[in-house]
Image (tube, grey):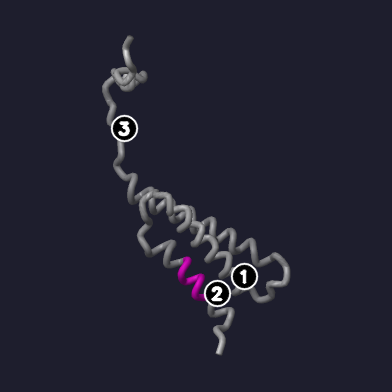
Amino acid sequence: MTIPFWLLGLVSLALGLLFTFIVPPGRRAHLAFLDELAVFLLFVFASFSLWPNPQGWNWLWPGVLAGIIALIIIEFRRFTRYFQNLTYRMRHPYYWYGRLHARRRRRR
């Protein structure tokens, strides 16, 4: 008994949508790129397996487009979650022209 190929496409599409819209995005770490790559590849594989006749390369563009849109949505969700209400805290003019790091230099 084998798993139908279209069922694998539906599962990969469901996982891609799950990771895009429901699973909370993690912080911007080193592994965030791998997560985004996995989501992108899920959408490309779903496009390949659900395309009616994947003889040529026509199946590639819908998968790539859906993957890029999913990555933009994930990055927007990450931005709204972790970078909300952040302000530049050096408000005094003393810090505006690079004098913050001047005290770290050694004087001779």
Residue 59 image-quadrant placement: bottom right
**Residue at the farthest top position:** 108
- In the image, what residue occupies the spot 29% across and 42% down? 85
Quadrant where the N terminus is found in the figure: bottom right
The alpha-carbon separation of the residues under discs 2 and 1 comes to: 8 Å
The amino acid type of the residue labelled 3 equals: Tyr
Left or right position of 25 against 68? left
The alpha-carbon separation of the residues under discs 2 and 3 comes to: 46 Å
Is 3 magenta? The answer is: no
First of labels 1, 3 by sequence position: 1
Picture coordinates of residue 97 (x, y %)?
36, 18
First of labels 2, 1 by sequence position: 2
Which span is picked out in magenta? Answer: 9-16
Q: Secondary structure at mark 3?
A: loop
Q: Which residue is the site of mark 2?
A: 9
Q: Which residue is the site of mark 1?
A: 48
Which one is nearer the viewer's eye here, 47 or 100? Answer: 100
- Contact between marks 2 and 3 (CB within 8 A): the answer is no
Which one is nearer the viewer's eye here, 103 or 40? Answer: 103
- In the image, what residue occupies the spot 57% across and 68% down? 45
User: Principal SS element in the magenta part?
Assistant: helix
First of labels 2, 3 by sequence position: 2
- In the image, what residue occupies the spot 55% across and 63% down? 41
Q: Secondary structure at mark 2?
A: helix
The amino acid type of the residue labelled 2 equals: Gly
- Contact between marks 2 and 1 (CB within 8 A): the answer is yes
The amino acid type of the residue labelled 1 equals: Phe
Task: Say the numbered circle drawn on residue 35.
Answer: none
Task: Say the numbered circle drawn on residue 88.
Answer: 3
Q: Label 2: few (<14), some or many (≥20) within 10 Å?
A: many
